[in-house]
Image: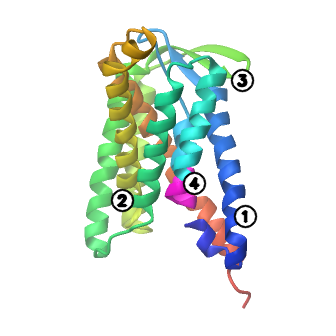
Amino acid sequence: MLTKSLGVPKRALPVLNLAFTAISTALVCAATMFFTVYVPATKGFFNVGESMVFLSAILFGPFVGAFAGGVGSMLADLLLGYPHYAPATLVIKACEGFVVGILSNRNPKLSRLKWRLITSILGLAAGLLLATVGSTYYSGEMELTLGQMLLTFYVPEAFWLALGLIAAASTVLAGLLTEPEVGWLILSVFAGGFTMVLGYFIYEMYFLFSLFGIEAYAIAEVPVNIGQMTIGSIIAIPLSKIIKGCFARRTAPSP
């Protein structure tokens, strides 16, 4: 975790963790609210809040990730006018953040060759998933919300195919040339992400109508949530590496 590498006294850690928790919660809420893309063809949308849930969990561990993910996302639901999702979001996103935080900080000891193989396979899988879900569910006319601004634009299928190829190639190259262990981060994020996908599916299938009288076609949201998870991972993993690298350089002893 990032807090362990800062070299601060142990008595200062609770205050530092509290500060990181507050900042992470605000970032999750803001990212969820202020950048959403609506897809009229499927009546679905995705946001980049997932990326901040993943980032908080990777950098600060399971408890900060759980609190920021659950509370930050729940606040966004309430402020955006989706109170019927708020209770589920609190639990589901907290579980997602906890899973990512607990797994990402428990890197198994494997040989570099095995890590390269795992990273390459997961990179190809992530790229294929992004290309497939994006071209199928996020192509065509889009409505992008940036705060109070609403922009309408067209996204061709080729955009997602190219993005999937770039994501796969960059992950494979990173595993082969720099950090073979990046595969474990991908696996950790996907484990948390699929916890979120399953959680919302169960909630929409069995609880949403009985609690709020709102009907939902639960299976239709599965690919939307998978796309949100995949895009969030593509943002969060490189960003976490950059932030950790910056802190490592700042805290390194002078020669």
Label 2 environment density (alpha carbons within 10 Å; few <14, some 14–19, many ≥20)? many
N-terminal of the two: label 1 or label 4? 1
Residue name at image x 43 percent, y 67 percent? 179
Give 71 or 181, whichever is nearer the viewer: 71
The answer to whether the residues at label 3 and label 1 have Cβ atoms under 8 Å apart is no
x%, y% of residue 30? 67, 35
Considering the whole magenta stretch, tell me its main secondary structure: helix
Residue 44 is left or right of residue 75, and the answer is left
**Residue receiving disc 3:** 147
Give 13 or 40, whichever is nearer the viewer: 13
Give 23 or 209, whichever is nearer the viewer: 209
Q: Is residue 182 above or below residue 33?
A: below
The answer to whether the residues at label 4 and label 2 have Cβ atoms under 8 Å apart is no
**Residue receiving disc 4:** 64
N-terminal of the two: label 3 or label 1? 1
- Between the C-alphas of marks 3 and 1, the distance is 31 Å
* Amino acid type, callout 4: Val
Question: Start and end of the magenta stretch?
Answer: 55-63
* Amino acid type, callout 3: Gly
The answer to whether the residues at label 3 and label 2 have Cβ atoms under 8 Å apart is no
* Amino acid type, callout 2: Gly
Q: Secondary structure at mark 3?
A: loop
Residue 59 is left or right of residue 223, and the answer is right
**Residue receiving disc 1:** 15
**Residue receiving disc 2:** 183
Residue name at image x 52 percent, y 54 percent? 57
Q: Quadrant of residue 149?
A: top right
